[in-house]
Amino acid sequence: MDQISMTNPEQSVAYDAMEKLQSGAYDDIPETRMGLTGKIKDTAKTFQSRGQESLSRMVSMSVNLNEAVTRSAEMIRDTREVDNRSQAIAAAAEELVASVAEIARNTEDAAADAQCARDTADQGVDAAGRAVASMERIAGAVEAASSRVETLAEASSQIGNIVGQIDDIAKQTNLLALNATIEAARAGEAGKGFAVVAGEVKNLSNQTSKATEDIRGRIDNLRAEMDGIVTSMREGADAVTEGREVIAGAGQEMSSMSEQVIGITLKMEEIAGILSQQTAASHEVAEGITAIAGMTAANVAQIESVVDFLAATDEELVAGLDDLLNQQIPDMTIYRAKSDHIIWKKKLAEMMVGRARLDPDELADHHSCRLGKWYDAIEDAGIRNHPAYAAMAEPHKAVHDHGIQAARYYKDGNLEGALDEIAKVAEASQDVLKYLDELIAR
């Protein structure tokens, strides 16, 4: 253009207009409908209109791409959490397999012990039966001995009666001897021999009385002993009867226990079978969870590759937006601020998955960002007096405040707090975008 000769003032104005058209200074081209300059002005308006349409589409694409990156970053975070939990569950499943196998072994051992207890109980029942039989025999022997002792006691009583009769006879004999002695004394010399015989009879009678007294004493002692023996035998019989009842009860208890042990043994065997099946099922579950964990890790890698592609595409869009900044397109700063606003939210999401490092002390506040600088410097009354302009201040401030606090929480290791703050950023961000769109559509 600088080689074109300027033959007249109109050509000079047209040349200047062409220079402005090439540089994108569309608003600086004079408003005229005359000649070449008018055509250039019309072309500038066309370029300006097309540039605004391209700008709108590029910003929409940038917003969508950054939203996709944000969602993908959230997916990476969630998928990593799933991966971590899958790994933990896989480890727990392996431990479960080992535990189930151990329980199965213990159950089998318990079933074997229960079988031993059953055998022991059966032996106890048999022993109790034999003990009852022995007690029955002892009871019979005790009853027989008691009967014989009673018979002996009756015989002792009979002997005592006979001794009594002998004692009576001895007393009568002694009385007759006394009478014979008296009569012999009356007979004088003729009765001396008879007196001697009567004396001997009297002595024998006295000895017989003493003997019967001794026999009576012995019989009394014998009867007392017999009574003691009979009492002991009766007590022994009662004890044997009681012992028989106790042993019989023990036998019934052991028989009942044997039946219970049989039931327990069957249940333990059933449980052992179930646990054996459960062991195989647990193995399958563990293998499935391990496979899921591997697939989850692969998904994370794929999502990260998609995020890399989206981020690279967004960088190209941002470069195109920066080229458009040099052109005089209506509301260019608002469009660019809208894109920057989404990028800010995207960086927070990337921070949560370790793809970006944000220092809370270096992050821009709501006055230092591109949108804040435009907001504070705007002089266009049509914008400043618009309701969306005033309404945007509070949510815009909230976006930066919560974003900085999220970065601070993340730096301190408080991930839950960071996620809560990012959720508040997303909520306030929706209002900011709504008000920006209202300003663009004014």
Image: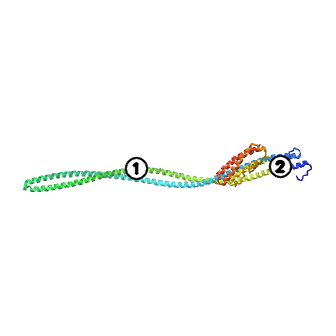
| Mark 1, other Cα within 10 Å: few <14 / some 14–19 / many ≥20 | some
Task: Identify the mark at residue 25; answer none if there is no mark.
Answer: 2
Name the secondary structure under disc 1.
Answer: helix
40 relative position to 184: left or right: right
Task: Identify the mark at residue 241; answer none if there is no mark.
Answer: none
Residue with the mark numbered 1: 249
> Three-letter amino acid code at disc 2?
Ala
Q: Quadrant of residue 361?
A: bottom right
Q: Is residue 58 visible?
A: no
Q: Residue at x 60, y 55 (%)?
A: 91
| Mark 2, other Cα within 10 Å: few <14 / some 14–19 / many ≥20 | some
108 relative position to 425: left or right: left
Name the spot of residue 229 as percent of width and height, x first.
29, 53
Q: Is residue 84 visible?
A: yes
Give whichever of 145, 5 is nearer the camera.
Answer: 5
Q: Is residue 216 above or below residue 437?
A: below
Give yes or no for contact between labels 1 and 2 (Cβ–Cβ under 8 Å). no
> Three-letter amino acid code at disc 1?
Gly
Name the spot of residue 170 as percent of width and height, x first.
17, 53
Q: Residue at x 25, y 54 (%)?
A: 221
Name the spot of residue 118 as percent of width and height, x first.
45, 53
Q: Residue at x 89, y 49 (%)?
A: 12
Name the spot of residue 301 as percent of width and height, x first.
68, 54
Distance of label 1 from label 2 (alpha carbons): 115 Å
Q: Residue at x 22, y 54 (%)?
A: 215
262 relative position to 89: left or right: left
Quadrant assignment for the C terminus: top right
Give whichever of 351, 144 is nearer the camera.
Answer: 351
User: Which of pointers 1 and 2 lies earlier in the amino acid sequence?
Assistant: 2
Please count the marks in the image.
Answer: 2
